[in-house]
Amino acid sequence: MSAGLPPPDYTVNEAGERIIAASRRPDGTVRKERRVRAGYVPQEEQQVYVSRGTAFRQNVPKCPGFEEASAEPAKPKSKSAAKNAKRKEKRQAEQAAPAAGGAEAAAAAVQGLSLGGGSGGNGGAAQAPAAAAAEAAAEEPPSLEKQIKKVRKKVQQAEALAKKRADGAALSAEEEAKLGKLAAWQEELRQLEAQL
């Protein structure tokens, strides 16, 4: 029996045997009637096996209002995931704050836009406000934390050069210049950390 066909119609003869009646195939040939053995159940009519564990899980009563998703304990965030979430919140806060003041600039930019996409007059003027906004974002000073990180790196490099010179190695002119700026960088680092 193929899975696409409906289950056969059984008839019971006078001897009490089940018989599948004769039928015609789609190509016109005839199937002869077939006797079904006693106790035989075709695979399509057999019940699907369900293990005890599956049956138990299906019959377990559920509490009203219980949601399985909320039953799982929340995993604590890893150090980097927490750091990334904090950065994301900070970025969203920074974007929300300038958006209020930038509404007038956005309105002015919309005023300068033209609806026609042709070679007509105001196309270059519409690009100017967008370029000015991009330059303003580029000129924005880096955050205090980033500045501190940069200066710390410079101080560490200069200290490494000082150790290298103390060990007796010769330094290039570039390395000597970097070493000469060590005191200034240390002072800048102290000032930045005081602002934090």
Image: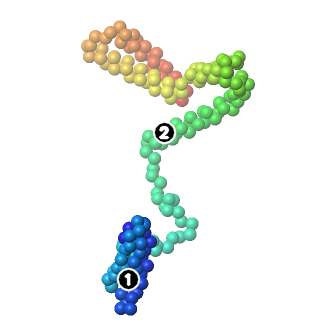
Q: Seen from this angle, which residue lies furthest front?
A: 28
The label on residue 39 is none
Q: Nearer the viewer, residue 104 or 92?
A: 104
Kind of element beneath mark 1: strand
The label on residue 84 is 2
Characterize the local packing of mark 1: few (<14), some (14-19) or many (20 or more) Cα atoms within 10 angstroms: some
Q: Quadrant of residue 53?
A: bottom left
> The N terminus appears in which quarter of the rendering?
bottom left
Q: Position of residue 40 (x, y in %)?
A: 33, 80
> The C terminus appears in which quarter of the rendering?
top right
Residues under numbered marks 2 and 1 in contact, where contact means CB atoms less than 8 Å apart: no
Residue at the location (50% across, 24% down)? 147
Q: Is residue 159 above or below residue 54?
A: above
Residue at the location (45% across, 47% down)? 77
Residue 179 visible in rendering? yes
Q: Position of residue 120 (x, y in %)?
A: 70, 18
Q: Is residue 166 above or below residue 104?
A: above
Q: Seen from this angle, which residue lies furthest top?
A: 173
Q: Quadrant of residue 174?
A: top left
Q: Position of residue 26 (x, y in %)?
A: 42, 67
Q: Is residue 168 above or below residue 94?
A: above
In this figure, what is the number of numbered marks?
A: 2
Q: Which marked residue is nearer to the observer: mark 2 or mark 1?
A: 1
Residue at the location (43% across, 16% down)? 183
The label on residue 19 is 1
Q: Is residue 137 above or below residue 15?
A: above
CA gap, disc 2 and disc 1: 72 Å
